[in-house]
């Protein structure tokens, strides 16, 4: 089968189109004929072996796919169209996934919707409900609000948790306009210089209650300074590769929380995946949530996809068309 394989960690150039054997599913796993794979910012970390998890070579990256089950397991039968979390191995014509992280797709859900609402939709859902614990009327800041997770977090703020003011950041006027169209009450530039003041101004002169942050470094610090007493800063990425150190006394004095979130920690608890995902698909069917697809790339052009996502020129979910030449 055709697949993208990494034999050394590094930049986009290390991803090579290769012909490798079809993977053999282990007990409790399904084999999926992949139609579309999702591309995530986390994949760029995996490619460099600089993510929360550590990887072994050779590596086929890709943590999510849509396709048809070739060999079933448990309640997931052959012939079903599914969306699945694979962990790795998604950039290929065939992939394996645990039955517990494989979900049959409702009729009418296309590949873009299915993948956008899987890892990134679940992340946005849990940012609000599980980690941020957003309460009715609280202000929410979404850093990189036009990104794959960010645009969904913006959209879910009011229908899911009855948030008060939703404030997005984005790097261009076009992206800021997108966040406003998707439901943000205000949008500002993501640049860390002056970000604290801009967030407070966007919240009517008051410090903010909850921040969803994925950049790290100076942006993290700017967001922390904009946080109100009893505020929560939820960290779900380190796009800048610049990690932060926080003094505990400062948190205590203002009764603030800094919460980390990594979706793959939830894979051992399928109940934290199935119900939220069903909720997301129902909201999409009602038109409450729009899956923003930022681009679709042939398998052979995965390097360009990684270059584009790291250049911060994309919006929404990026897809990999595994069948395309």
Image (cartoon, rainbow, N blue to C red):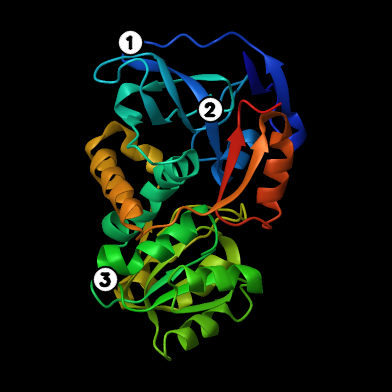
Secondary structure, mark 1, is loop
**Vertical comparison of 32 with 53: above or below:** above
Would residue 26 be found to the left or right of residue 324 on screen? left
Dot 3 and dot 1 residues touching (CB under 8 Å)? no
Relative image position of residue 98 (x, y in whole percent): 35, 22
Q: Nearer the viewer, residue 286 or 86?
A: 286
> Could you give the CA–CA distance between mark 3 and mark 2, rounded to whole angstroms?
36 Å
Mark 3 surroundings: few (<14), some (14-19) or many (≥20) residues within 10 A: some
Give the quarter of the figure containing the N terminus. top right
Q: Label 1: which residue? A: 27
Secondary structure, mark 3, is loop
Secondary structure, mark 2, is strand
Dot 1 and dot 2 residues touching (CB under 8 Å)? no
In the rendered image, which quarter is residue 256 located in? bottom left
In the rendered image, which quarter is residue 22 located in? top right
Would residue 145 be found to the left or right of residue 157 on screen? right
Q: Label 2: which residue? A: 35
Q: Residue at x 43, y 57 (%)?
A: 290
Relative image position of residue 121 (x, y in whole percent): 40, 49
Q: Nearer the viewer, residue 15 or 315?
A: 315
Q: Label 3: which residue? A: 162
- Mark earlier in primary sequence (1, 2): 1
Which mark's residue is nearer the viewer, 3 or 1?
A: 3
Which mark's residue is nearer the viewer, 3 or 2?
A: 2
Q: Is residue 19 visible?
A: yes
In the rendered image, which quarter is residue 219 located in? bottom right
Relative image position of residue 4 (x, y in whole percent): 66, 24
Would residue 79 be found to the left or right of residue 230 on screen? right
Relative image position of residue 190 (x, y in whole percent): 60, 71
């Amino acid at each position: 089968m055709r697949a993208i394989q990494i034999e050394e960690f590094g930049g986009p150039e290390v991803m090579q189109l290769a012909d490798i054997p079809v993977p053999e599913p282990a007990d409790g796993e399904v084999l999926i004929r992949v139609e579309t794979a999702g591309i995530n910012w986390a994949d760029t970390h995996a490619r460099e072996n600089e993510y929360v998890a550590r990887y072994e070579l050779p590596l086929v990256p890709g943590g999510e796919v849509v396709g048809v089950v070739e060999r079933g397991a448990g309640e997931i039968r052959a012939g079903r169209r599914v969306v699945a979390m694979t962990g790795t191995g998604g950039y290929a014509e065939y992939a394996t996934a645990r039955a517990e992280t494989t979900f049959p797709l409702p009729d009418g859900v296309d590949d873009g919707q299915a993948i956008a609402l899987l890892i990134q939709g679940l992340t946005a859902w849990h940012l609000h409900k599980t980690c941020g614990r957003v309460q009715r009327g609280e202000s929410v800041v979404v850093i990189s609000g036009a990104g794959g997770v960010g645009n969904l977090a913006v959209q879910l703020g009011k229908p899911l948790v009855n948030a008060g003011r939703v404030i997005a950041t984005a790097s261009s006027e076009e992206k800021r306009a997108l966040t406003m169209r998707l439901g943000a009450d205000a949008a500002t530039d993501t640049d860390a210089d002056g970000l604290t003041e801009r967030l407070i101004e966007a919240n009517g002169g008051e410090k903010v209650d909850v921040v969803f942050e994925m950049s790290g470094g100076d942006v993290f610090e700017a967001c922390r300074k904009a946080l109100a007493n009893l505020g929560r800063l939820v960290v779900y990425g380190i796009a800048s590769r610049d990690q932060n150190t926080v003094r505990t006394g400062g948190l205590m004095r203002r009764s603030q929380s800094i919460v980390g979130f990594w979706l793959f920690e939830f894979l051992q608890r399928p109940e934290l995946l199935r119900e939220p995902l069903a909720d997301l698909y129902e909201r999409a069917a009602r038109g409450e949530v729009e899956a923003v697809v930022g681009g679709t790339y042939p398998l052979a052009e995965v390097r360009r996809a990684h270059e584009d996502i790291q250049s911060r020129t994309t919006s929404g979910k990026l897809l990999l068309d595994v069948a395309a030449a």
